[in-house]
């Protein structure tokens, strides 16, 4: 294509194996040659992805664990493999209905015209994915993009090199490069990738990089979906069952060692229950990981740099005399990080300013619910919000008065698993949604079509406007 020169100029050594813009041009011309993508073709692509994933599962699970230095196989199976297989099954089951041309009502003045909405593929779409669920966040958007009949280019994370290389192998075995192409590499490649004039660009990652992606896409007027992060609060209301809340918050925070976009980032709790809450959460951590962080059911931190960042957060809190509870120090694996509860930290600490993205959990006391609400609403709209309350009105107070990507009441994180619900952020935690039908629509153009009738009333709007002038 015409952009080839400017893009290849930016590409670092990583991508010597594939010329980005050539790949893009190849997908574009394949798309132009076959703009209609029938149900059978889409189902076949989904089936190929499904079969390839089932076959690659053991290797992928092992690769992820190596990339992290350690991650429980069950976490990879459930949240990376099974979740995607679930999305594929759901899409295959419902695709025929999603693709159906939908009849739309016709306003009286246009009768007897007919109106319909026709979902069509967007064309060539890009997906940029992060490291924390390296299979799920690469392939789950891909399921939606393929179901909608698109050609897909994927740029997986450089922080999970073994997993990304395997994904690339797996996808190139199952698809021709003009159907699905994988481009591996770091920020240089990612920058060049996000400058391609895609028909849609789907990004999952940090808010800071998401901003850069949105800027790059804006130059091409490429529409974006941004799945970003932020500080997701868990709020304990007076009617909450503290033990249950503690267990489910600890679960949401222990998963993947807190490296989860929807992990509870901090807890707001009525002041007189702060210690009870800390106790319930630490108790749950101790129950989950009786051997401490060495437990085979607990993941390591993705890199030394990320580990050092978390350690610095804890050190800063200690230096300020904040009370901490830690589940033992890590012993064998230097990249394990002990689950840590932080009591009532000052709000200027890094751990209250940044998304934590690790197993550190600040607990903040509040005196009345309005004060807790103000604390949450004065901050960026979070990706997720968790409210723990047995009382229905206490639940409603938070559902009505806050905006967040999604909500789970009396649990954490599970709303992400529903293929029947839209998933996405709001404001700085993201824009656009996917999963199930919502993903299909994100990657489709919902084209309105009107069919005019032979005998219709439109002649009254044709000049000369004599009758109208008289009325005015
Ligand atoms: P990241 O933003 O550092 O990287 C994500 C991807 O962007 C990687 O593939 C990377 O190579 C690429 N990238 C880097 N620089 C780029 C640039 N200039 N232009 C284009 N792409 C570039 O994110 P991460 O550290 O991999 O992931 C952690 C973050 O992702 C957290 O903030 C977390 O909350 C968020 N996240 C969000 C979701 C969600 O669904 N909303 C899911 C998982 C993670």
Image (spheres, helix red, strand yellow):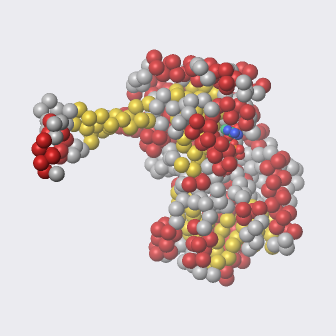
Closer to us: 258 or 447: 447
Along the horizontal axis of the image, is 332 left or right of 251? right
Residue 235, placed above or below residue 329:
below
Residue 418, placed above or below residue 95:
below
- Image coordinates for residue 290, horizontal then vertical, percent: 77, 61
Along the horizontal axis of the image, is 103 left or right of 425? left
Closer to us: 276 or 416: 416
Residue 187 position by quadrant: top right
- Image coordinates for residue 344, horizontal then vertical, percent: 74, 74
Is residue 61 visible in the rendered image? The answer is no
Q: Residue at x 58, y 19 (%)?
A: 1
Q: Residue at x 47, y 36 (%)?
A: 443
Q: Quadrant of ligand 1?
A: top right
- Image coordinates for residue 92, horizontal then vertical, percent: 44, 35
- Image coordinates for residue 124, horizontal then vertical, percent: 52, 28
Q: Residue at x 50, y 18 (%)?
A: 30
Along the horizontal axis of the image, is 93 left or right of 144? left
Q: Residue at x 72, y 20 (%)?
A: 17
Residue 410 position by quadrant: bottom right
Is residue 362 visible in the rendered image? The answer is yes
* Number of marks drawn: 0
């Amino acid at each position: 294509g015409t952009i080839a020169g400017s893009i290849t100029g930016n590409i670092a050594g990583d991508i010597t194996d594939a010329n980005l813009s050539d790949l893009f041009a190849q997908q574009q011309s394949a798309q132009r040659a076959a703009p209609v993508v029938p149900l059978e073709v889409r189902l076949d692509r989904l089936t190929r992805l499904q079969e390839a994933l089932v076959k690659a599962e053991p290797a992928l699970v092992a690769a992820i664990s190596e990339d992290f230095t350690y991650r429980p196989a069950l976490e990879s199976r459930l949240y990376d493999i099974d979740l995607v297989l679930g999305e594929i099954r759901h899409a295959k089951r419902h695709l025929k209905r999603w693709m159906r041309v939908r009849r739309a009502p016709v306003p009286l003045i246009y009768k007897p015209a007919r109106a319909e909405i026709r979902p069509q593929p967007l064309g060539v779409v890009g997906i940029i994915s992060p490291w924390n669920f390296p299979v799920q966040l690469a392939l789950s958007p891909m399921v939606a993009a393929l179901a909608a009949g698109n050609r897909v280019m994927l740029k997986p994370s450089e922080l999970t090199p073994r997993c990304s290389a395997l994904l690339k192998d797996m996808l190139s075995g199952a698809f021709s490069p003009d159907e699905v192409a994988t481009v591996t590499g770091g920020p240089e490649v990612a920058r060049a990738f996000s400058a391609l004039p895609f028909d849609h660009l789907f990004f999952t990652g940090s808010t800071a990089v998401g901003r850069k992606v949105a800027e790059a896409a804006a130059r091409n007027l490429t529409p974006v979906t941004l799945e970003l992060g932020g500080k997701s609060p868990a709020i304990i209301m007076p009617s909450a069952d503290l033990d249950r809340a503690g267990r489910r918050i600890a679960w949401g925070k222990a998963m993947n060692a807190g490296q989860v976009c929807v992990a509870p980032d901090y807890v707001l709790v009525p002041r007189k229950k702060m210690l009870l809450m800390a106790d319930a959460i630490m108790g749950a951590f101790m129950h989950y990981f009786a051997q401490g962080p060495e437990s085979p059911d607990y993941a390591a931190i993705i890199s030394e740099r990320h580990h050092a960042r978390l350690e610095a957060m804890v050190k800063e809190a200690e230096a300020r005399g904040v009370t901490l509870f830690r589940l033992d120090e890590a012993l064998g694996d230097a990249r394990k990080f002990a689950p840590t509860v932080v009591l009532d930290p000052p709000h200027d600490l890094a751990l209250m300013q940044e998304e934590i993205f690790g197993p550190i959990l600040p607990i903040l006391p509040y005196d009345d619910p309005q004060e807790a609400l103000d604390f949450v609403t004065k901050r960026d709209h979070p990706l997720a919000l968790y409210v723990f309350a047995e009382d229905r009105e206490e639940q409603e107070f938070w559902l009505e008065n806050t905006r967040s990507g999604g909500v789970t009441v009396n649990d954490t994180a599970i709303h992400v698993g529903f293929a029947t619900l839209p998933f996405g952020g709001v404001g700085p935690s993201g824009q656009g949604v996917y999963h199930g039908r919502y993903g299909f629509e994100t990657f489709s153009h919902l084209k309105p079509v009107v069919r005019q009738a032979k005998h219709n009333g439109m002649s009254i709007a044709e000049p000369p406007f004599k009758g109208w002038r008289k009325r005015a």
